[in-house]
Amino acid sequence: MQGLSVVICTRNRVKDLTRCIHSMTDQNMSKDYNIEVIIVDDGEIPGAVLDEYEALLNKKGYSFVYYSKTDHGLWLSRIKAVELASMDTILFLDDDVEIPAHYFSTLLQTYLDFPDCAGVGGVAIGMRNSFFGTIRCLLSFQQSLSSGKLSLSGQAGSMYNWHKARKTFRTEFQHGCNMSFKKEAIKDLEPVPWLKSYSVGEDIYMSRVALKKGKLYINPDLKLLHHESSASRDNLEDVAYTRVVNHVHLLKDKKSGPLGYLALLWTTFYLILRERPKKNYPAINGYKKGLKQIFSKELA
């Protein structure tokens, strides 16, 4: 069906989620346009809260779908959301974002302006690097010189310069807090063994799937607030380890040559050095564990 499915994959962040839902009800969209809001839940939301969401959304003219999962993990939530979505365009929002009143209308207009696209993404306000921060990210292979490209080690640091864009541009990846796709481009998503729990890099992988069906764009007018809540995420050691290992899998999926793995090695050394002054030992231990996997025969 022609319309927009807005998906929020969540886990035990009711306060954040409520704020996000309220921002959706302030959209300047006509009630004649088909919009459904889908919550895929890995945690627990009280029944009274769900009733409140449904009432708010129905009043706006949106339909509401709630699905509670027992097989945890963000990637599996994405897959289930695509199965549940009945509209031809799917927007994924993090549960801890707030969108401005023009967001839905700007997104849908972008699809009309770029009919060849498979997906459209936006920008998180405040996600930016200073001049010296950009230099550090470039030297540590966390960022590419091109805003729409991944770095040599497969990192998505180029998104920290997206706020500088003045017009819509081509990209090879989107940011998971703020990404959308034509359903046709991602309808064949399948479980991936290495995309578990917090699923670092799943937005890069999903973008790669969609690119097979068309072009991806970033519209800098699609700005939102991303509060980046830390509630209910995995522990720092696991996140750090996964950040390294999942990028090994992404390099493997891309059939990267040795240079990509060497770049990831350098990136990981930099991340360890960055955490030492903070005495962030859980993250340091996670990165060190990840180092051992970069040239593992089982992964690379």
Image: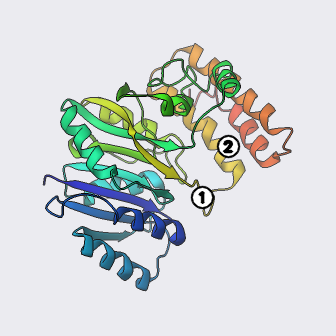
Q: Nearer the viewer, residue 119 or 105?
A: 105
Task: Pick whichever of labels 2 and 1 is earlier in the sequence.
Answer: 1
Q: Judge whether 13 appears above or below 142 on screen.
A: below
Q: Judge whether 243 appears above or below 28 on screen.
A: above
Left or right: 62, with 257 as reference point: left
Please state which amino acid type lies under the numbered disc 1.
Ser
Q: Nearer the viewer, mark 2 or mark 1?
A: 1
Name the residue rendered at 23%, 60% in the picture.
35
Q: Quadrant of the N terminus?
A: bottom left
**Label drawn at residue 229:** 1
Image mark count: 2
For label 2, the residue is 240
Left or right: 60, with 139 as reference point: left
**Label drawn at residue 237:** none
Indicate the position of residue 286 as horizontal and vertical percent values: 72, 43
Residue 187 shows in the view: no
Quarter-wise, where is residue 38 in the image? bottom left
Indicate the position of residue 77 as horizontal and vertical percent values: 40, 57
